[in-house]
Image: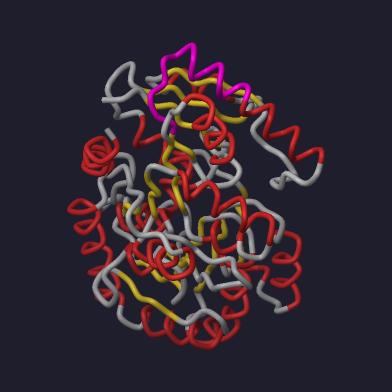
Amino acid sequence: MRKVLLISEVFPPVHGGSGRWFWEIYRRFPPGSVEVCTDRHPEASESDDKFPHNINRTQLSSKEWGITSLEGLTFYLRIFRYLDKLCQSQLIEQVHCGRIIPEGLPALLNKFRRGIPYTCYVHGEDVEVARTSREITFLTKLVMRHAEKLIANSENTAEILRARWGIDDQLLVMTPGVDINGFFPMGSTPRTRWRNKRVVLTVGRLQKRKGQDMMIRALPAIREKIPEIYYCVVGGGEEEKFLRALAESLDVEDIVEFSGELNDTEMLECYQQCDLFALPNRRINNDDEGFGMVLLEAESCGCPVLAGDSGGTRETMIPGETGVIVDCTAPEPLARTIIQLFSDIPALKKMGVAGRSLVERRFSWDSLASKAIDKLA
């Protein structure tokens, strides 16, 4: 296959669904077929040692993604020069970009200079947010026009590209997946983390579209019917201060746990021992959930799932069988659904079993990586 250079700002040890996706897919590529270019990180050495391909680190983050500012223009020129040297020294034959912007623009310049084709991943929220800026819209269209392929992370994202960007011939749909050996059900082992509680878990960055605030708003009504309800929020982000204040104002701070970022062992324990995983996502302006890898991780651990009726989350489950889709733009539907789910615990557990079966059939990394190699070779 053609030797690949993957360029992505988001890559382990940075937490994020797209970074995990790239790690799992490209580590399964044949030896010597991949080089990675990613952002610097103070804790990178340990994770880099575990990756089977060479990782090159440089500053890939910038506050400016446009080219009309000096900071943005300088950023792109610097990354282009770095990319150009890597392509020359490592005999790169194709470039894969973690996003259209910013990673795709240096790849476009590289194609103009070296003739090396590039492919861009598209996550849904990225192209939707791009439409809020005239300059970023222009750059996005320019990068798209010259890309060899555009990889949508869901059918929902693919439809956005077709309907709003006029993309068709270059389009591939390749969903993220899950490590079914790393995320597995607890079995009959007694629960140790949360005794005598009915636990709803959310994992993800603390930002408005993830919907942690709506779940907190739903808690007073849920607690009236389910006194043992408990909500665990895993992740960090800009909304943490607001969410803590919201829980206090609604007098539910005693049943809301902010766990912050957890290591892999702690994260697995949370998935295995919660009763319901909830990603109560909703669309905020143009910001939407493109897919929702955390839903797959929960299902792989035998956990029933709930997600908002927005973006591509529906594609991670079989609604009514492995989980439920809910309007999460208000707390009332969320509260009613959770109360209903907890009224039939055997049915809830049956959903979890069905979820594990689903990810084994359709979302294992080994299967998805094999398909990716075939499509991108």
- The furthest residue to the right: 70
Residue in the foreground of this view, choosing between 131 and 183: 131
**Above/below status of 80 relative to 334:** above
**Range drawn in magenta:** 81-95
The residue drawn where x is 56% and y is 24% is 83
Residue 34 pos. (x, y %):
38, 23
- Residue at x-position 43% and y-position 58%: 292
**On screen, residue 98 above or below 214:** above
Q: Residue 372 falls in which quadrant of the image?
A: top left
Q: Is 96 situated left or right of 25 in this image?
A: right
Where does the image place residue 69, in percent across and percent down from the top left?
Answer: 80, 44
Which quarter of the image is occupied by the C terminus?
top left
**Residue 101 seen in the current view:** yes
Q: Quadrant of the N terminus?
A: top left
Numbered-mark total: 0
Nearest the viewer among 148 and 127 is: 148
Q: Identify the residue at horizontal 38%, vertical 76% (top origin).
A: 325
Residue closest to the far top: 89
Residue positioned 77% across, 46% down in the render: 68
Residue 154 part of the magenta segment: no
Determine whether, in the image, residue 279 is placed left or right of residue 189: right
Colour mapping used in the image = secondary structure
The picture places residue 115, in percent across and down from the top left corner, at: 45, 28
Q: Magenta part mainly helix, strand or loop?
A: helix
Residue 180's image quarter?
top left
Give the answer, above or below, for where 21 lies relative to 362: above
Q: Is residue 190 visible?
A: no
Q: Position of residue 214 (x, y in %)?
A: 59, 76
